[in-house]
Amino acid sequence: MRSSNFRRYPPSQSLLVGAAILLGSLMSLNQAAALDNGLAKTPPMGWNSWNAFAGTIDETKIKQIADIMVSSGMKDAGYVYLNLDDNWMANPARDSSGNLRGDPTRFPNGMKALGDYIHGKGLKFGIYGDRGTMTCMNVPQSGSYQHEQADAKTFASFGVDYFKNDNCNPVGNIQTDYQNMQKALASSGRDIVYSVCHPNGYSDWMQSTGNLWRISGDIVDKWDNGTNFYKGIINLIDANASLASHAKPGAWNDPDMLEIGNTGCTTEEYRTQMSMWSIMAAPLLAGNDIRSMSQTTKDILLNTEVIAVDQDAAGIQGTRIKATNGLEVWCKPLGSANGTTKAVALLNRNASASNITVNFTDIGLSGSASVRDLWAKADKGSFTDSFSMSVPSHGTGMLRITVGGGAGGSGSTGGTSGTATGVGGTSAQGGATSSGGSGTKSSGGTSASAGASSTGGSKSTGGANPSGGSSASAGGSSSAGGSKSTGGANPSGGGYGTGGTSGTGGASTGGTTNASGGASTGGVANNSNGGTTNSVATGGSQAGLQPGVGGGTASDVGTIARDAGSGESSGCGCRVASSNSRPGLSSTLVVLGLALWQLRRRRLGETRRR
Ligand code: GAL
C-alpha cells in the first residue's frame, strides 16, 4: 500500500476545499472553450503507479507492469497508458545541462529506453511532474516552474504520451503555470495528453488548459472519508456530481484514480467505483498492483460492457437524477444526448440491500424498453415504464436501457446503437443512434413509429421518443425524424412543433418558435428550450429538459428541471448547451470576487504548508 509519508495536504484544508468546490459550482455556470489538441476524445484509460506503490518505483517493476497490462487483457480492454507517478526522477532531478533525468539507480537504462519498452508492448507512456519548484515528494530541482519549454521537450524525447502536472511547491500563478506547460507541450513535437493535477476543485480555466483536471483532493482506499481532504469513493462521487456540464470529448473531470483491488474497500464498493466512474465518464486509471490481482479485481476492471459506458463516443458525463433516502439513480445518455439508449447506475449508499427503481420517463424514455444488466452480463428482458432491482449495500446496479433497439428486420431488436443493419423490416425500429432502415415503419423508437410517409434511412433518426407528440411520427413529413428533425436544419422542437403533449425532453432541443418540451417531461409551459422567442422554460414536473441545444438565443438555468431529491440533476435527455448558460454580469462579479478571495486564501494556504 502507499505510504502516507508522501502526503502533503494537512486535513485542516477541508474547509478550503469545500469553498473551492462551491466556487467550482458557481463558476460552472460559465463554460470555457475546451482545449482542442485532438487528444483524449474518450476518457483516458491506463494504469498509474501512485496508489499501489507511491514512490517505490523502478524499471523492473514498471516493465513487469507493462507485461501484465498486455497479458491480463487490460490493454485490449482499453487500458493503454502506463503512467509513472512521483519519484521517477534523480536526486537532484536535473543533469548538468538542466534537463530532467530519471533516477540512474532505479531506472538504469534511462527513461527513453523505458518509453521504448512500453511502446514496444503497444502501450503509451505517461509521466509525472510539477508546476512548482519541486514535486510533492520534494525531489530537489524536480519542478517545472520556468522550465516548461525544456521539460516538455525532454518528455517528448523520452517518448511521453501523457503528462500529469501536479501542484506542489508553487511559486507562480496557478493558471499561468498550468497554461505555460500546456503551450510547451503543444510545441514539443509530440502528442501529449495533459492532466492538470490541481486537487483543490474545478476552476473555469482548467477546461481550456487540460484534457483532464482533478476535481478534489487525493483518493484514499476507503468508501467514505468524511469531509477530509483525502477522499473516499463516495466522497468523490459527490464532489463530481455537479460538474457534469464541463465534460466533453477531449476534456474530462478527473475524480482521481481507481483503488479497485487495493483491499481497503469491499468488492461491492469497488464495483461501485468502476460503475460510477464509468457513468461519470471519468478517466479509468487502475491503481492496484496488477501483477498479483485477484480474479474478482480483474472481473471488475475488465468488464468491457461497463468500460463501454465510460468510453461512449458521445462523451457525456452522467448525472444523478434521483436521490431518495440513500438510494440513487444516475443516468448517462449513450450515443447522443437525445438517443434511445441510456446507461443507468442504481447506487445504494445504505448499510443494507434495497430495491431501486428507475422510471423510464426520468431518463427520457417511455413505454417498453429492453434492459441489460452489465454486471451480470445478462439481458433482463423488456419492461414497461420502469425497472427495479435489488442492490447490495454500497453496491451499484449497472444497466443499459434501450427503447427500440437497433434497426433490423421484422421482430429484431437489433443492437444498442444500431445503424440500420436490418433494412426494411416492417416492424423494425431505430436504435439509439440508429438512422433506421428503409422500410415503411423503420426508424424511430417504440413510441413513435415512422409515419406512412416515412422514407426512413438517413432522414429518420428518431429515438426513444422521437421528437413529436402523439401524432407526430418519426419520418413524417412535418415531424421530427424526417429531414426536419433532430440535428437537421430544423432541429426537432422547431417551427414544426414537434414535441406535443407527450413529447419528451430528448427530442425537444433547439427549436425556433414552438419548441417542444411536452407536458410529460420538460417545460411545463410547452415552451421553448432554446427557442428564439420563448426562452425561459421552467422545467418540467419530472426531470426533463436542459437548455436547448443548438437552438435559439436565450434560455437560462431556469430551464434545467431539477429532480426534487437531488441538487444537480438535469434529466437524461440532453446536455447543457454552453451558449445557453452564461451568468449575468452581477453573478460574474460575485464569482470573480469569490475567485480572488479564494485564490488569495489558497496561495496563503499553499505558502503555509510548504
Ligand atoms: C498528489 C497527487 C497524487 C500523487 C502524489 C504524488 O498531489 O494528487 O495523485 O501524484 O501527489 O506525490
Image: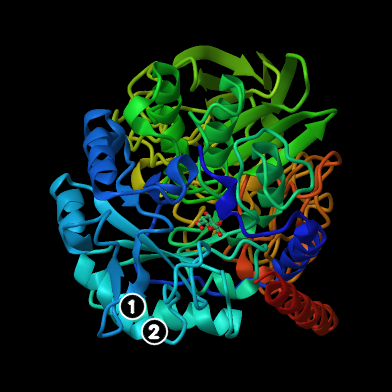
User: Disc 1 designates what residue?
Assistant: 151
Q: Can residue 435 be seen in this snapshot? A: yes
The quadrant in which the C terminus is found is: bottom right
What amino acid type is highlighted by mark number 2? His
Q: Tell me if label 2 and label 1 are in contact, CB under 8 Å.
A: yes
The answer to whether residue 313 is left or right of residue 11 is: left
| Residue depicted at 48% across the width and 62% down the height | 251
Number of residues whose C-alpha sits closer than 10 Å to that of mark 2, classed few (under 14), some (14–19) or many (20 or more): some
Q: Is label 1 within 8 A of ligand 1 (CB to nearest ligand atom)?
A: no
Residue 88 locus on image (x, y percent): 35, 59
Q: Quadrant of residue 399?
A: top right
| Scheme of image coloration | rainbow
Instruction: Looking at the picture, tell me which residue is in the foreground, 197 or 500.
Output: 197
Report the number of discs. Answer: 2
State the residue position of label 2. Answer: 147
**What residue sits 47% from the left and 14% below the top?**
379
Can you tell which mark lies on residue 261? Answer: none
**Image spot of residue 295 (x, y percent):** 39, 17
Q: Is residue 31 above or below residue 569?
A: below
Q: How far across and how far down the image is residue 589, in percent?
A: 81, 84
Quadrant in the picture for residue 356? top right
Q: Quadrant of residue 442?
A: top left
User: How packed is label 1: few (under 14 Cα within 10 Å), some, or many (20 or more)?
Assistant: many
- Inter-mark Cα distance, 2 to 1: 6 Å
